[in-house]
Image (tube, coloured by chain):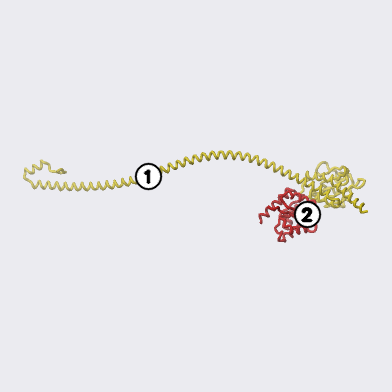
Chain colours: A yellow, B red
């Protein structure tokens, strides 16, 4: 038997020699009891240790389980990361592709912008051209209407009415006087008027004032253009004088006074209209007069 | 799309011819009348989509004709463009009081008239 606090062989021999067996047994018993206690104590410690180890084992197992979970999670995350990397790679590929497309598109856009600018410029030029043509078209229409209307009748009153309408609607004046040259060519007498006091213009001597000088020269007068002859009384508001010619001879004259407020100045079209009136109004009036005479003769 | 019908009312044959020539460039069917009275009558029979009307006319002037048109159910909302000799504010104001929608001044600028006719026809179509 080996135990802690065991009786040594020397002590046993001494106790046997002394014949003190009880003492010996007692001592042994005491030692055994102490030994038992120690064993129990040792056993308790061992149990505690075992319990502790079991707890530790449990904890370790739990930690292992957690570790496993973490490992699984880690693996899962790695998978996800891998998928993410693949996606990233894919997206980067797409991005590169998109950048290439964008570059192409940007180049195309720049090219289209340049082309658009050219088209815009063409468009602007064509619009200007169109407006110019429209204006020319409108001007020609004005001239056509004026010519058509002047020669559209053989009624003298209608020709005079047409002259008034042309001045009012196409030139833009509501103050006009129509004169005819008297036989002998020394005076202009008022044939028709509107918008003015006719009394002041019944007779105008040729060569006097703006109207008389225009009749004398046969040149169209437009106020504000070139040297103006000295105005006679009543000619202050005169805008234009158009001598009416038949085969180069002045037979009458149209005097245009103030323009309508919205008509600011005499324009190129007006000058063309004046030219047309100068060359077409006199023949129209002459034809109407001849027609009237012919009608009168045929009636007789 | 059917062609829009435009009634032109003017006593001046020269102005009437000029306006007709200008508007015939557009996709319009044109009818004419020689004074305000005839204009109102033709507006009722022809039912135009737009009326271009001179102000100074015999029998019935453009302002009175416009007033009459506004009183009639058939022409109450038909756009009217007045052709005025004088573009002063007072004259234009009278036109608007009579119910006209827009105006142009003489001598008529072809592009201006075409633009205003187109604009009024579009506005009228939107209003319906």
Residue B80: image location, x then y, percent? 72, 55
Disc 2 target residue: B10
Q: Is residue A175 left or right of residue B115?
A: right
Residue A232: image location, x then y, percent? 86, 47
Disc 1 target residue: A72
Q: Residue at x 48, y 41 (%)?
A: A90
Identity of the residue furthest to the right in this view: A300
Q: Would you call the spot at circle 2 few (<14 residues within 10 Å), some (14-19), or many (20 or more)?
A: many
The chain containing the residue under callout 2 comes to B
Which quadrant holds the N terminus of chain A? top left
Q: Nearer the viewer, residue A63 or A27?
A: A63
Tag count: 2
Tell me whether the residue at label 2 lies in contact with that at label 1, contact meaning CB atoms closer than 8 angstroms.
Answer: no
Q: Secondary structure at mark 2?
A: loop
Q: Residue at x 14, y 47 (%)?
A: A32
Please determine if labels 2 and 1 lie on a single subunit. Answer: no
Q: Would you call the spot at circle 1 few (<14 residues within 10 Å), some (14-19), or many (20 or more)?
A: few
Residue B64 appears in the picture as rendered: no
Residue A142 appears in the picture as rendered: yes
Residue B50: image location, x then y, percent? 72, 55
Q: Nearer the viewer, residue A168 or A187?
A: A168
- Label of residue A274 in the image: none
Cα distance in 3D space between marks 2 and 1: 97 Å
The chain containing the residue under callout 1 comes to A
Q: Quadrant of residue A7?
A: top left
Q: Is residue A32 left or right of residue A162?
A: left
Q: Secondary structure at mark 1?
A: helix
Residue A281: image location, x then y, percent? 85, 47
């Amino acid at each position: 038997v080996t135990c802690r606090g065991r009786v040594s062989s020397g002590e046993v021999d001494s106790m046997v020699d002394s014949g003190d067996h009880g003492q010996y047994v007692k001592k042994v018993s005491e030692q055994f009891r102490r030994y038992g206690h120690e064993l129990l104590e040792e056993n308790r410690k061992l149990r505690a240790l075992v319990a502790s180890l079991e707890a530790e084992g449990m904890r370790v197992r739990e930690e292992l389980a957690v570790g496993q979970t973490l490992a699984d999670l880690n693996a899962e995350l790695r998978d996800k990361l891998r998928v993410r990397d693949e996606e990233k790679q894919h997206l980067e590929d797409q991005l590169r592709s998109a950048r290439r497309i964008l570059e192409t598109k940007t180049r195309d856009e720049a090219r289209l912008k340049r082309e658009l600018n050219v088209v815009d410029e063409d468009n602007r030029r064509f619009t200007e051209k169109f407006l110019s043509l429209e204006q020319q078209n409108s001007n020609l229409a004005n001239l056509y209407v004026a010519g058509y209307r002047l020669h559209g009748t053989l009624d003298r009153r209608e020709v005079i009415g047409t002259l008034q309408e042309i001045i009012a609607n196409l030139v833009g004046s509501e103050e006009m006087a129509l004169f005819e040259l008297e036989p002998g060519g020394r005076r202009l007498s008022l044939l028709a008027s509107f918008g003015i006091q006719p009394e002041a213009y019944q007779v105008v001597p040729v060569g006097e004032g703006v109207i008389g000088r225009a009749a004398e020269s046969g040149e169209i007068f437009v106020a504000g253009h070139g040297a103006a002859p000295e105005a006679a009384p009543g000619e202050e508001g005169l805008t234009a004088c158009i001598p009416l010619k038949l085969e180069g001879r002045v037979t009458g004259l149209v005097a245009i006074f103030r323009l309508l407020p919205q008509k600011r100045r005499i324009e190129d079209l007006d000058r063309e209209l004046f030219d047309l009136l100068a060359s077409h109004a006199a023949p129209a009036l002459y034809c109407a007069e001849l027609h009237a005479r012919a009608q009168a003769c045929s009636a007789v | 799309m059917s062609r829009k019908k435009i009634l032109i009312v003017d006593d001046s044959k020269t102005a009437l011819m000029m306006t007709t020539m200008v508007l015939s460039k557009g996709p319009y069917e044109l009818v004419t009348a020689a004074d305000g009275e005839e204009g109102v009558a033709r507006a009722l029979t022809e039912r135009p989509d737009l009326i271009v009307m001179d102000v100074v006319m015999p029998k019935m002037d453009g302002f009175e004709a416009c007033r009459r048109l506004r009183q009639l159910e058939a022409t109450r909302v038909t756009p009217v463009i007045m052709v005025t000799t004088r573009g002063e504010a007072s004259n234009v104001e009278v036109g608007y009081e009579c119910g006209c929608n827009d105006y142009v001044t003489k001598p008529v600028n072809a592009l201006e008239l075409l633009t205003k006719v187109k604009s009024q026809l579009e506005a009228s179509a939107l209003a319906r």
